[in-house]
Amino acid sequence: MKLVEHFQYGLNSPICLTWELTYACNLACVHCLSSSGRRDPRELSTAEAKGVVDELQRMQVFYVNIGGGEPTVRPDFWELLDYAIDHNVGVKFSTNGIKLDAARARQLASTDYVDVQISLDGATAEINDHVRGPGSYDTAMRALENLAAAGFAQPKISVVMTRQNVDQLDEFTAIADTFGAQLRITRLRPSGRGADVWDELHPTAAQQRQLYDWLVARGDGVLTGDSFFHLSAYGEALPGLNLCGAGRVVCLIDPVGDVYACPFAIHEQFLAGNVRSPGGFQQVWQHSELFTELRRPQTGGACQSCLHYDSCQGGCMAAKFFTGLPLDGPDPECVRGFGEQALAARDGDLRLPKSDVDHSRSAPRNSRRGRAPVPISIGARPADGGPLIEVRPARACEASPLAPGTADTRLGSAAARV
Amino acid sequence: MRPEPFGALLYHFGTRRLSFLKTPQLVDVVTGLERHDDVHAALDSAGVVDAERPAYLRALAGLAANGTITQRRQETE
């Protein structure tokens, strides 16, 4: 069986675990996928968070992606960082840079197993600040300067691709080179507040092609978090899982301990459980009803007969869900245009699903209601055997796209199939 | 080394590389390396048949190339 087929039946522990430590944030980015702003009074305490780390260590989750909100505004952030690393749970954390002064940069530079990812959504202040808020470009640049001055090796610059910044890909590369950083680009999702701006900001069809061509030509060494697998249908399959990993190899622990199928699916329909419940995270990961359902074999629904189904597998579950499209149909950004047709064909009275988890500073947090069953459809790839091993880049969810020299590709083709 | 249905997930904290050992037999081979004098003894012990041996050698070479396993230092007394 090919590895990716094993993945769709789920693993003993996740490979890519995102853990958002707080909903508090100093910024109010218009596309925030977790609708962050205000801290939630029910957020995990320091002791509870350490308990989660202990559990991750027991489950051999080798590293976590920590985010928020802005994780560094938690007063115990640095304590938790050290605790995780001391317990063999490596950390990559995403930040807007607000707390990365010279002293913190030096501290990070002397810490093993920590990666830092600075968010930047424009190569110029004008484009960045339009999305992330006034002053956020300068904050990110200052953080990158401090990291470089402290000798921190290869921080990441993480860019959400929008209609406004697709043209700046080369400029982002130049910025990354200036700071000895690695560029990471990800897809804009209609999740959280992103739903409010998705129509305005998601790349046009022509820009998607432009992005794909850029990845083919210059994407060597650029990280993508596997987020553009829906573009594989243009031709060349993008290295990576090419599989929606939600609940199978990926999940999210949110600041109050709720476990969702993926970071882009903070909605009660994708809520699997809470780390505070008996059995903790392991129970949720291995036995929750939702994750069990997500790991059942899926059919491709309307997409099954498509020539490109094997490469895109119907795309992103969260992107479909939050744009009101059926989960067994095309991705809203389907490169063959079926998504656009489906969007146009939506009922005019359709109410888009909206998360009731909202910590935006202007909006109240509402109580959660009961969870309805989730209609799911994520497809399978045909079996063709598999090589004995596959080696992934440092972080499994950070496959380098299109790089002919990635260990994964090389070994995949070199090793005999069994 | 984390056991998984397909075999195991192998993570090296030094190189930060994650490898997927895609058969239980390969897991036996890799875990057996430290107990045996050489690679072939580890392959024998895990019961790898001759026909499959080249594939396993390539897999081990891949793990060695990315630093996940390293050659044992020679005794030089």
Image (cartoon, rainbow, N blue to C red):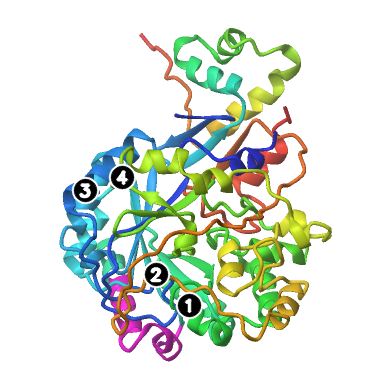
Q: Nearer the viewer, mark 3 or mark 4?
A: 4
- Dominant secondary structure, magenta: helix
Q: Do the residues labelled 4 and 2 touch (CB within 8 Å)?
A: no
Q: Are marks 3 and 1 in contact (CB under 8 Å)?
A: no
Which residue is at 74% across, 55% downward?
A300
Quarter of the image containing the C terminus of chain A? top right
Q: Give me the chain letter of mark 1.
A: A
Q: Which quadrant of the figure has residue A392?
A: top right
Q: Name the residue under label 3.
A: A48
| Amino acid type, callout 2 | Ser
Q: Can residue A173 be seen in this view?
A: no
- Residue A10 rendering spot, x and y as whole percentages: 55, 40
Q: Mark 2 points at which residue?
A: A34
SS for dot 1: helix
Q: Give the magenta-colored segment's residue range.
A: A123-145
Q: Does the magenta stretch include residue B65?
A: no
